[in-house]
Image (tube, grey):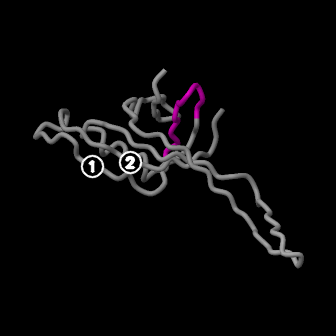
Amino acid sequence: MRTSLYVNATNALVSDNITLAKPRQETTEVKNRLLSGEWHVQTVGDPAKSFELEFIVYATAQETIDALAANKTPLRLHRHGADYIGIIDGNPDWEQLIGSTDPARAKYRCRIVLLVTGGD
């Protein structure tokens, strides 16, 4: 099955033309140098996970995706047989790929960071 992005509550497809799904992990660490000169590293809490996503959509979807980001609507990323629930961090970044006077024919590349809040 293809990597796809959905609205979690309604199962509405946002995009199944995902060109980048790069997983990221952030940890909180406390590093101390011991009197002996050795390092002591303590990890605080669980790592925070996110995905850097790029996908292609028609211009007609731009307002919808902007609203999903503004309202922090939970999305579901289906990738490699697993589902990741998350929200868009900040605002989407848009790049026009194919221009047209008809928004149903114009294509955009959308870049977002999906902050993972749950999943399988």
Residue farthest along the bottom direction in this orientation? 35
Q: Quadrant of residue 81?
A: top right
Lower sequence index among marks 2 and 1: 1
Amino acid type assigned to the residue bearing label 2 in the image: Arg
Element marked by disc 1: strand
User: Three-letter amino acid code at disc 1?
Assistant: Glu
**In the image as oriented, which residue stretches furthest toward the left?**
101
- For label 2, the SS is strand
Query: Is residue 75 covered in magenta?
Result: yes
Q: Residue at x 37, y 31 (%)?
A: 17
- Residue 77 percent coordinates (x, y): 51, 35
Q: Residue at x 52, y 42 (%)?
A: 74
Disc number at residue 95?
A: 1
Position of residue 101 in the picture relative to residue 4 (left or right)? left
Q: Position of residue 1 (x, y in %)?
A: 49, 20
- Left or right for 73, reference 104: right
* Quarter of image, res 43: bottom right
State which region is magenta: 73-83
Label 2, label 1: how far apart the Cα atoms are: 8 Å
- Residue at horizontal 69 percent and vertical 52 percent from the top: 47
Label ID, residue 111: 2
Q: Main secondary structure of the magenta part?
A: strand
